Amino acid sequence: MDVEQFRKAGYQAIDRICDYYYSLQNKLVVARVQLGYLKALVPSTPPESGEDFQIIADDYQRLIVPGLTHWQHPSFFAYFPTSCTFEGILGDLYSSSVSNPGFNWACSPACSELEVVVMDWAAKLLGLAPKFMNDSGVGGGVIQSTASECAMLAIVAARASHQRIYPDTKLEEFIIYITSQTHSLGIKAGMVLWLSVRILEVKAEDNYSLRGDTLRSALEQDKKASKKPLILIATVGTTSSGAIDNLHEIKGVVEDHPYLRVHVDAAWGGVAFSCPEFQKLGYLDEINEFADSFCTSFHKWGLVNLDATALWVRDRKYLTEALNTTPPYLRTKQGDADTTIDYRNWHFAVGRRFRSSKLWFVLRSFGVQGFQQHIRKSIRLNNLFVDLVKQSDIIKIVTPPSLSLTVFRLEPPSQQWQDLQSLNALNTMLFGRISARDDIYLTQTILSGKVCIRFVVGAERTKESHIRRAFDTILKEAVLALEEWKRPSAYSVL
Ligand SMILES: *Cc1c(COP(=O)(O)O)cnc(C)c1O
C-alpha cells in the first residue's frame, strides 16, 4: 500500500467506523454467533501472495463485525464498561502511525515527555497528592496495560524492598494479602510469583469492605508464625459489588506494621475521584497519606480506549530498584545522568506503546468538567435504576449501590421464597433468561452464597431511556421466570 492508497483506505475506514456508530443503537448488544464460527469462514493458512486490501477491509465487515459484542452499545451493562471516545481513537491512531516503543527518553523524546506530563495531569484530575506526581522527582505516574500488571508490579516491588531489608527471608515466608472480594489478579499474582496468598474475610454486614481489625489479627497471627506479609492489595470498587475497603482503619493498622506495603486497586472506581463529592467515599485522603501505589484504568470508565491503566507510586525507586537492568545497548547519556524518566524501568517489558497520546487527546477534549460530567451522568443513571428497583416488590438490591454499579436479585415477598437454595435456582433461571436476550447485556455474581445480577452504567451513549428499557426488560423477565418456576419441570433445576 502506498501513501495515496492508505489515504483512500483510511478515509473509507473512518467512514465505516462512523456508520458503525450511527447504527450502533439499533444493533443487538450481544454477538449471536456459534462457537468456532470464524474457523469455518477463514482459510487455515495465510495467503501465499498478498491480497487486495479492499477484500480484506470488506471481510472485516462481513466476518468480524457480526462476531463482536458491542461494548459501546448504550444497553451494555455487563462487567465494567470500556467507554471509548472518538478523541481517544484518534489519539491512538496517531500513536499507531509512528509505532514508537518509547522505552527511554532518547529513543523518542516526545513519548516519555508526554507521558510524564499527562500522568501529572491525570493525578491532578483525580486529586492525588503532589508526592505521587512526576514533577515531585520522588513519586510518579506511568501508564501500564492492565490493573493486573499494576498489582503484579507492586508485588514485585514490595518483594524486592523486603529482600533488601531482610536478605535472609525465604520466598515461602512471604505472603500477599487480599480479600475474598479482591479481583482474581491477587490469586494469579501469587501463582505467577510463587508467593502464598492469604485471603482475608470480609462480611456482608460491612458491605464486603475490609476492616482494620481483620487485617490486624491476620498480621499478628502471621508474625507469630514467622511469616512476612509483604503487601495488601486493597480495593476501591470491587469487581463483584463495588465494595470499598476501609482504608481509614487500614491506615491505622499499617502505622503499627510499617513494613506492610499497600497497593490500591481502583481499576474501575478510581476515575470517580475526578468528582470531589466521591473522594471521601473512596478514601482519597487516606490513599494520599499512606498508599504505596494506586491504579485506575482509564480504559474502563475513563473515556480512553483500551489499554490505559494509570499507576502511581509514592516512591519511584520502589519500581526502579526492583526492575532496573541496564545492558550496554540501553545506556544513554540522559539515563546515566538521571535527568529523565526511563519508563522501561517502571514496567516489565522494555518496549511500550505510546499510550499517553490518547490520554492527552481525551483530557484536552473533555477538560476536567467534561470528564466529571461523564462520571456524574453514569452515577445519576445508576441512581435512576436503583429508584426503579426500589419501586418493584419482587426485585431487591443486595448490597448498597456503589457509584454506577448495582447488585440485585429477584426476591418475591412470599414465604415460599425464604430458603437460599430455591432463591438461587430462581435467580439462575432469571439470569439465564436475561442472557438469552441479545438486546441487553448484564453479568452475574455470587455474594455470601447468593446468586445475584450486576448492573453497571458507563457506556458514553447510555441515556435515561436505555435505563428505563433495561429495567422494564428485567422486570418482564422476572415475572416470566416466576411463571416458568410454577411449571412442574422447572423444579428439576434444584
Ligand atoms: C477490571 C478490574 C481488574 C482487572 O483488570 P485488568 O486490567 O483486566 O487486569 C482488576 N481489579 C478491579 C477492581 C477491576 O475492576
Image: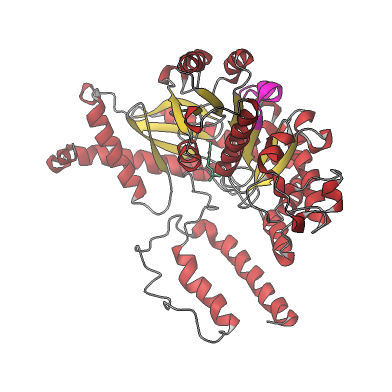
Q: Quadrant of residue 447?
A: top left
Please provide the residue range marked out in magenta: 280-293
Q: Residue at x 55, y 42 (%)?
A: 148
Residue 281 lies within the magenta run = yes
Q: Position of residue 217 (x, y in %)?
A: 47, 13
Residue 219 lies within the magenta run = no
Q: Is residue 328 above or below residue 391?
A: below
Q: Residue furthest left?
A: 488
Looking at the image, residue 374 sits to the left or right of residue 107; the answer is: left
Q: Residue furthest front?
A: 168
Closer to the camera, 138 or 224?
Answer: 224
Q: Position of residue 63 (x, y in %)?
A: 46, 71
Q: Is residue 246 above or below residue 378?
A: above
What colouring style does the render use?
secondary structure
Q: Residue at x 44, y 64 (%)?
A: 67
Looking at the image, residue 79 sits to the left or right of residue 159; the answer is: left
